[in-house]
Image (spheres, grey):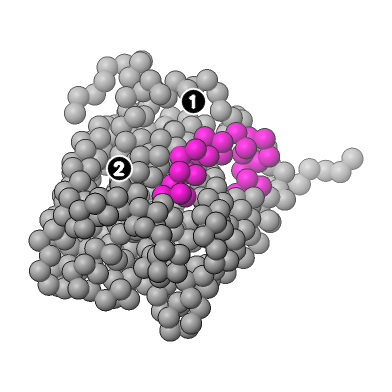
Amino acid sequence: MEKARKITPKVMVSRNTLLIFGIIFVAFNLRPSITSVGPLISFIKEDTGMSNSAAGFITTLPLLAFAFLSPLAPRLSQKIGKELTVLIALVFLGIGLFIRSSGMLFTLFLGTGIIGLGVAICNVILPGIVKQSFPTKVGLMTGMYTVSMGTMAGIAPGISVPLAETLHLGWQGSLRVWMILIIPALFIWLVQSKRKEKIPGQYFQVTPAHSSLLSSGLAWQVTLFMGLQSTIYFCFITWLPEMLYSHGVHISTAGWMVSILQFSGIPANFIIPILADRVPNQKGIVIAIGALCMSGLIGLLVGGNLVLLCLSIISIGLGTGAAISLALTLMVLRAANAKQAANLSAMSQSIGYFLAALGPILLGFIYDVFHSWTIALFLLMVLTIIMTVAGIGAGRNQYVLEEKRGAIHTL
């Protein structure tokens, strides 16, 4: 009989290193396919003749996929394993990128939907993988993959227009470029998927406890914070170039402004999860996030000159960068175990992204009707206030479902 291979500390370090790189490369692929679209919307509209509301749907469609497909990710992972699940998700992402860039209106939306499927699965699985594989380094690992996600999310909008115009790739070729990032990620997760490791405690199993999260006020607060911060973020990713264009900023410069927004959030991407993991509760962090977003929105509303617009965008970038990192961290911190983290991740991303999906369409509709971004900015201010209130509740030092076993902590 063949002897079982002994897993030495050296082997474990090697496996963890490969897993870390795998997480980073997945994170690289989670946002460029979405953030690269905003600066190209004017080209797409001119080529296809679509309205602002329809153009907003290009960004919204992946969010709808996140909303409806996120609950399926834990079930799929339970059946075939988390590594193979991530690998399949990356394949779908690559297929979606190829189909979307074919140039036809139908394939533009079809490919975008398939992209949403791939990203949705990865969105849900990653927080659970961190909880399972790095339980003592939740903040560090969450910071690492949100920085990776934010870096590529920032590069994409900045180079979208130059790729389309300077390199003469058109909007189709500019969107197709991001298939390059899929290749190393596929290789790493192909290696990961060949491992036949037993997942302790049926890690991704969805039990009746998942449905009971719907009765947890804390779970709903985490979900609402996740959804509203995503709404604000994706509204800016979609419409910030058009907002700035209305202020007289050239569309190419406006694309780089979206990159500034993304890059401004990178320090917060890394620092906030580590800080959130160390403090007793996260209420103060939430209040700071709300203040940053609100001050940036006021700056955009006032307008004026390019310096003020840049400062406003940096403020929003810091706020939204901190918000997504905190939202992902709360999914882990508010869960008592890895299985609960997967279920909370599925709930908060499913319902949260459904809320976020309404934002870009609604803002596009408002602009179509009023031909001004003022009402849209006021709406985002209201959403920022609600997000802050929900985040203060989500920042309590408590596990979901703990309300039923003990007294609810006061705010």
Q: List x then y, in percent, for residue 226.
A: 34, 41
> Which class describes the residues within 10 Å of circle 2: few (<14), some (14-19), or many (20+)?
many
Q: Magenta span covers which residues? A: 60-86
Q: Earlier in the sequence, mark 2 or mark 1?
A: 1
Dominant SS in magenta:
helix
Mark 1 sits on what residue? 210
Classify the position of the N terminus by image quarter. top right
Kindly tell me whether residue 298 is visible in this rendering: yes
Whether the magenta-drawn stretch holds residue 71 is answered as: yes
Residue drawn at x 59%, y 30% is 205
Which amino acid, mark 2?
Leu
Q: Is residue 152 left or right of residue 363?
A: right
Question: Residue 49: within the magenta?
Answer: no
Mark number for residue 228?
Answer: 2
Q: Amino acid at mark 1?
A: His
Quadrant housing residue 371: bottom left
